[in-house]
Amino acid sequence: MAAVLEGLEPEETAAAAEDAARSAVEAVESRPGAPFLLAGNQLNLDVHPGGCHRLQYLCSQQPPELLQVEFLRLSTHEDPRLLDDTLAQVPWSLLRLRSLVLKGGQSRGALGACLRGTLTTLPAGLSDLACCLAHLDLSFNRLETLPPCILELRSLDALLLSHNRLSELPEVLGALPALTFLSVRHNCLEKLPATLGSLSALQRLDLSENLLDTIPSEIGNLSNLSELNLASNRLQNLPASLAGLRSLRLLVLHSNLLTSVPTGLAHLPLITRLDLRDNQLRNLPAELLDAPFVRVQGNPLGEASPAPPSPPDISQIPEMPRLFLTSDLDSFLVTPHGCSVTLACGVRLQFPAGATTTPITIHYRLWLPEPHLVSLGPHDFLLSGVLELQPHGVAFQQDVSLWLLFVPPRVQRCREVVVRTRSDDSWTDLETHLEEEAPKRLWARCQVPHFSWFLVVLRPVSNTCLLPPEGALLCSSGHPGVKVTFPSGATEEPRQVSMQVVHMAGLELRALLEESEASVSPLLCLSQSGPPSFLQPVTVQLPLPPGVTGFSLDRSHLHLLYRTPSTATWDDITTQVALELTHLYARFQVTHFSWYWLWYTTKTCVGGLARKAWERLRLHRVNLIALQRRRDPEQVLLQCLPRNKVDATLCRLMDRYRGPEPSDTVEMFEGEKFFAAFERGIDVDADRPDCVDGRICFVFYSHLKNVKEVYITTALDREAQAVRGQVSFYRGSLPVEVPQEAEAARQRKGTDALWMATLPIKLPRLRGPQGSGQGTDFSLMPLNLGDAETGFLTQSNLLSVASRLGPDWPTVALHLGMPYRELQRIRHEFRDDLDGQIRHMLFSWAERQAGQPGAVGHLVQALEQSDRQDVAEEVRAILELGRHKYQDSIRRTGLAPEDSPLPGTSASQTPESAQA
């Protein structure tokens, strides 16, 4: 409906909204057997779709029956905006409302689990129901904080908040005098407010399935409490004040870590059930042991407390299953017994026993880090590929551990490694722990909350806090002196605030400004959840730039810069704020968050300079390399690498490659896409999956390898002379006219220039059989290995594979099933010619496999068994591209309908993954 209402005037918008709501209601009522859901004083709109539209329509018509409604049930499986607009109309349309049920859970996922509703907060206008609303059910939703309007509902008798995401309850919760039933089951509570003891009318309290490790002693003030459920928490002890709950009839404490309980529990006069199962209790008072209402199964009662428990008999404990997947497997089965899994790509997963109640098949895939699959901030660095685990969104009963192998970053000031995951169309960072297996082998370990996409990122250290209405102080852990002070009343409801600080070297800044005395403070990024602005000004403190003190500076040279989020520009706001200076710090007040930077310079206009400095923090100085294989110049290695790694890389490659000197220094952003293309009659193999219109596609990540090895050919006659061409690296689309090398160099004028580098390529003249040596007279027969339906490898594909095997070729040959005697013969026939040995081995094997089913799969398996996962992944990508081309051609010729599954399509392959 939102798309229909765009571009209308306010009056037209209201009329259109009413028409849309009426149409939705009529569509529901027109169905055969649709019940009339407005009956008496009850309005049930949670059993059929279109409940919000129906309620909006009723509110607009105001039938007399609507004024009599006291009970309203509404599903929260609706569009969040539509749900908010609908709830905003409830207070002035349902004046006698006593019970409001806004539950999710009516819909279920693929595995049968109840899905949460979209509710994240409540409109403030619901507080107008304070005199009449007595029952509020918000179960199975996405609440992370308690909506402030609830605390104004003074007549509230029952509040149900189970199956949400609450991490704490506000202190002002004790201001609900009429509350008799409170359920916060299955949330993320880690502590309870002491004011909970002020709920003097409370009779039933359910806090089970949370993360509580302590209970405040004030809970003993709940004199009318008859039922208390604290099951499935992390409680190690209980306050003695529990023995003062004289009205308590039911106390549930099973599945905790209790080692003792207050002795006074045995003397509660009305207790009828005390559940202490599955704890660590060793001793109990005799009164409790003999009482018929006490359940104590699952406790080590009777064992001596001082002595440590005897070690279990390992032979009697079933070992957790361990799975090591090979390259041809992309799925595995997890049972309720749990398992430890090592994927072929090196990723580890551990499913504890009880993580799932039924067997479930997990699919995985490792994606190349293309920009559409990677979420990076302006100062983040990617350290790994992208791991996808399916089915997406699956929830487990126990935490699942994930280990991701990543490239160790260079030491960088105030940065941290985190695992980033995609959830609800947004990326979030998980709590990550680093484990070192070898000096250059690091693992990022985290607890996986769901299955989706995962990657490892190096980011500036992030400091966060939950801002309550009472105010807070947020400090930077890496930069002393950077802090933000939130006064009382800055927000009406708790919100998450965070800060990141980025340091800029003074030498870089002075070189950019060409000013020896220039300096800047750390760059401060502030962000928040919830409304964009604060109700009260927030005080920000930044250290003065190095070398500057509050007593010696010239205020005309001090500039406070602010980055506008909408335009991505830097503005000088020095004259717009009251800048308070001390000897070391500068303080100012803001009402909303973005980026802030304090500069000390004589330059009068610093906006453009700040943009250049901002880009300089994100840029990498790199060189581009094009090397030709010595024994086969048609094999070209293309690489982009940071400037400080060029010399070491060339020394390592020069035994097998030769070519021009690396290009001049080029500046490139993290995650930037660029291309390489060959000109002057030189073509690249178009069957490569990373080849777009004859161009090789790169994505630069400073901590990952940015290398391609391609097989090039020429249509020109090389029998008489050598062919001279060039390879050019550039951004964006390829112009019609390709410049000469010198002209391309002149076109490079900064980071936005189209042309980055042009390097010469030379293909030597073809030699006839008379001049061929022993190791070079081997002719490569044109062949296609495999078939078009399942994917095939062409001659150029096999040459690309051969170029990457190197000294590992004998191991691959043995796994291919070639006898050792043939390996010895190849070594002797092509002695002193490593490339000839590899090509002869691979092509002689391929010729024997022509027409044989499963040949390509055998090759991939042999590469995996030889620890050449990199080559195997390239072969898989080529096969996947071939299958897609085959399927597209089948559809284009009309041999298969558009929506029908085609031969060679995996059953587990989703349309989304195929498109990606």
Image: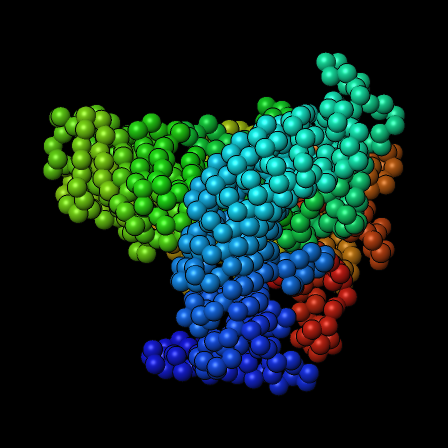
Where the C terminus falls, by quadrant?
bottom right
What's the image's color scheme? rainbow
Q: Nearer the viewer, residue 911 or 648?
A: 911
- In the rendered image, is residue 262 in sight? yes
Which residue is depicted at the point 71% across and 37% down? 274
Farthest-out residue, top: 306
Farthest-out residue, front: 269
600 shown above or below 44: above
Q: Which of 502 and 82 is in front in this view?
A: 82
398 shown above or below 84: above
Which residue is depicted at the point 20% across and 46% down? 572
- In the rendered image, is residue 365 in sight? no
Q: Is residue 121 left or right of residue 838?
A: left
Q: Where is residue 89 in the image (x, y as percent from the top left)?
A: 43, 70
The quarter of the displayed image where residue 90 is located: bottom left
Q: Position of residue 168 (x, y in %)?
A: 50, 42
Which residue is depicted at the point 84% across and 29% down? 317
Q: Where is residue 801 in the image (x, y as percent from the top left)?
A: 69, 45
Q: Nearer the viewer, residue 465 or 234?
A: 234
Which residue is depicted at the point 44% across and 54% down? 154
2 shown above or below 347: below
Q: Which of 693 and 568 is in front in this view?
A: 568
Q: In this view, does 699 lie to the left or right of 742?
A: right
